[in-house]
Amino acid sequence: MLDIKKGVSLLPYNTLKMNVKAEMFVEISSIEDLKNLSSQTGFPERKKLILSAGSNVLFSGDFDGLIMHNGIFGISVVSEESDHVILKVNGGESWPNLVEYTVEQGWGGLENLTLIPGKVGAAPIQNIGAYGVEVKDVIVSVEAFDFTTGQQVVFSNDQCQFGYRSSIFKTTAAGRYFITAVVFRLSKFPILNLSYGPLKQAFEGKSSVSIQDVSAEVARIRQSKLPDPEMIPNVGSFFKNPMVDQTLADKIAMDFPGLPVYPQNESHVKLAAGWLIEQCGWKGYRMGEVGVHEKQALVLVNYGHGTGAEILNLASKIQDNVFEKFGVILEPEVNIY
Ligand code: EPU
């Protein structure tokens, strides 16, 4: 039964803890709910937003439309072979709980993505990633409800057009689909990914490393750098790591030999936005109720009563400063509404 509520506070639904309201709010518990909702008169024209855990959104003010909250739960094993398991997970399930569950089962693939806040349905949208792994590496397919046709569709991994913090659901098909489930292929004989420097160092010289060990180490690294949104409201990385021409990177490195550079292809490299921001002196900077995290300059935080306008003001000052100093454009990673 659909229950469309009016004037709902979004405070419990966004990890940056913006104190804003939604004009309308509905909990989606099934595909049936989506069919009923989308066949209502006025639905296609209405401004709307699918919200999961709200761990990658910035509300710059009240939302004058309909929020559809993903509450479709359930996990099932689709098939199990001697070396892998195919797992279907509905979109409303918690991402960190899913990782914990798969690690406990000894199914490898998600361990590097331990403790990323959010829900499963949002994971493919921005192709969440951390410590050398992206969710695209283990996704078989994505199931979604198409608001345009009123039908369920299945996207293969290729059809999702995954990129760095990007997919078709964030670009050409933004807003068209509600992700109802994600299908993963997890390995029973895990192939560990220890390519991320600090992770590699932690296990240097150790002969038998399990996925449980990797998950525990990732949790330790995260907790040492990234603020827990429950304690200090935040949305993880606020900006993407910028992709720049090799020539620009070389020019910057002449003045700043410590510049971290991640080669992407023959002519482009990725730079560490957190490093660029720290070099501009913003790390730990506080401006009223908002600020830059003291241990990770890529994370903007709300000290309690910050507003969207204050966060955006701080973000734009940082962008201007990084551009002036390095000639690099920082793009937000967070979705702004
Ligand atoms: N760095 C600094 N100062 C800072 C932050 C970083 O000098 O304040 C330097 C580090 O020393 C390192 C480099 O920048 O040399 C990269 O830092 P780190 O390994 O901490 O990762 P990141 O590039 O800042 C990315 C993801 C994170 C993910 C980590 C680990 C993006 C936008 N962010 O951050 O993802 O957890 O790598 O893999 O790609 C998120 O998306 O919300 C997120 C937290």
Image: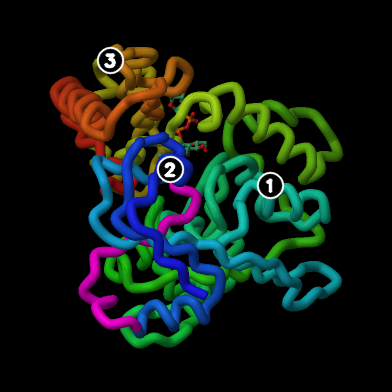
Q: Using the image, tell me which numbered label, if any, was put on residue 14.
A: 2
> Element under label 3?
strand
Q: Using the image, tell me which numbered label, if any, was put on residue 52.
A: none
The residue depicted at 37 percent of the width and 27 percent of the height is 300
Q: Which residue is mark 1?
A: 111
**Other-residue count near label 1 (Cα within 10 Å), few / some / many at <14 / 14–19 / ≥20:** many
Which of the colour schemes (rainbow, by chain, secondary structure, one colour) is used?
A: rainbow
Q: Which residue is mark 3?
A: 287
Whether residue 243 can be seen here? no
| Front: mark 1 or 2 | 2
Hey, what amino acid is under mark 1? Glu
Dominant SS of magenta comes to: loop
Q: Position of residue 124 (x, y in %)?
A: 48, 60
The residue depicted at 53 percent of the width and 48 percent of the height is 118
Mark 3 or mark 2, earlier in chain: 2
Magenta stretch: give its range: 40-55
Hey, what amino acid is under mark 3? Met
Q: Position of residue 199 (x, y in %)?
A: 65, 32
